[in-house]
Image (cartoon, rainbow, N blue to C red):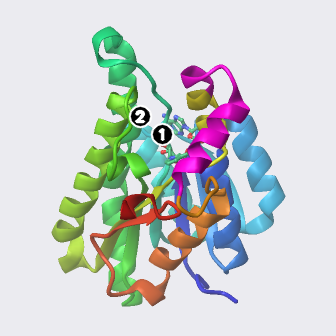
Amino acid sequence: MARLRGKVALITGGAGGLGSATARRFVEEGCRVAIADVDDDAGESVARELGDDCAFVHNDHLDNDSNAAAVVFAVDTYGGLDILLNNAGAPYTGKIETADDEAVRRSFDSNLLGPFRMTKAAVPALRARARETGKSASILYTASGQAINAKPDISAYTAAKHGVRGLMRSVALELAPDNIRVNCVCPVATDTPLFREMAREMSDSMETTIADFERTVPLGRLARPVDTANAFLFLASDEAEMVTGVALPVDGGMSAY
Ligand SMILES: NC(=O)c1ccc[n+]([C@@H]2O[C@H](COP(=O)([O-])OP(=O)(O)OC[C@H]3O[C@@H](n4cnc5c(N)ncnc54)[C@H](O)[C@@H]3O)[C@@H](O)[C@H]2O)c1
């Protein structure tokens, strides 16, 4: 199968759990992928593993120059840009009364401002590609179950992820005339380094935390990175050419409650 044959993607946070799983899935389906991340060692290692159809570029998605350079890198390396996946983000836990201002600011920056800035940087290349190919270009965000539901003690993360969903909806309407589709995926807890860091801060026992989470999920398990990667695959492909402005839960039924 080559559901993304001929397409080029740029994935922020591409060295991490969900980003690297999505890069792998996209490459399997014929896409060429530039992974952008602050973590050079992990990013280079993922790119090496995925071969010629994957290349790494250092990126801090909070930095406008770095974002512009990452877009140029994808276009120069692979000849254009069809798909931007804004996936980089950082964990946050803490109660509202004792919240540290700097930690809250970092959560908003990493989970919302970075995706906003990278989107801004990539629109011209995506628009040009949609015109050139006659196919829609695609902007994707890794939101979260926290963009739809809420949990206590992670308010800054929840607020930022709700913001990502709002950003996605507004940009979807703004860019529809350019044939750029804009969607987000809302994964439930997924076993990645980010999840483990948040879980460690919220409980002493990782096993108890995971078991507690799993009991709340109708389908009875955490998500796997590939569950989310498969949702992105559909939304990025031409199969979804009439789908824009959608927040797709990959949550084992959580949002049905
Ligand atoms: N794991 C979960 O349970 C879960 C659930 C829902 C949503 N998410 C979201 O999925 C996304 C990916 O998370 P993950 O679980 O794969 O975490 P992860 O920690 O494995 O990956 C995050 C990646 O983002 C990179 N990154 C951090 N700051 C960056 C910056 N300023 N510029 C560029 N790259 C940066 C990190 O180096 C890392 O490689 C995040 O947006 C997260 O909020 C995760």
Above or below residue 20? Residue 78 is: below
Coordinates of residue 154 in the picture (x, y in percent): 39, 29
Q: Which residues are magenta?
A: 200-217
Circle 2 — which element? helix
In which quadrant of the rendered image does the N terminus lie?
bottom right
Q: Nearer the viewer, residue 186 or 126?
A: 186
Q: Which mark is residue 110?
A: 2
The CA distance from mark 1 to mark 2 is 5 Å
In the rendered image, residue 135 lying in the magenta stretch gets the answer no
Q: Are marks 1 and 2 in contact (CB under 8 Å)?
A: yes
Say if disc 1 is inside 8 Å of ligand 1.
yes
Say if disc 2 is inside 8 Å of ligand 1.
yes
Name the kind of residue labelled 1 in the image. Answer: Gly
Sequence-wise, the earlier of marks 1 and 2 is 1
Coordinates of residue 4 in the picture (x, y in percent): 58, 82
Name the kind of residue labelled 2 in the image. Answer: Ser
**Which image quadrant is residue 74 in?**
bottom right
Q: Which residue is mark 1?
A: 89
Q: Nearer the viewer, residue 98 or 100?
A: 98
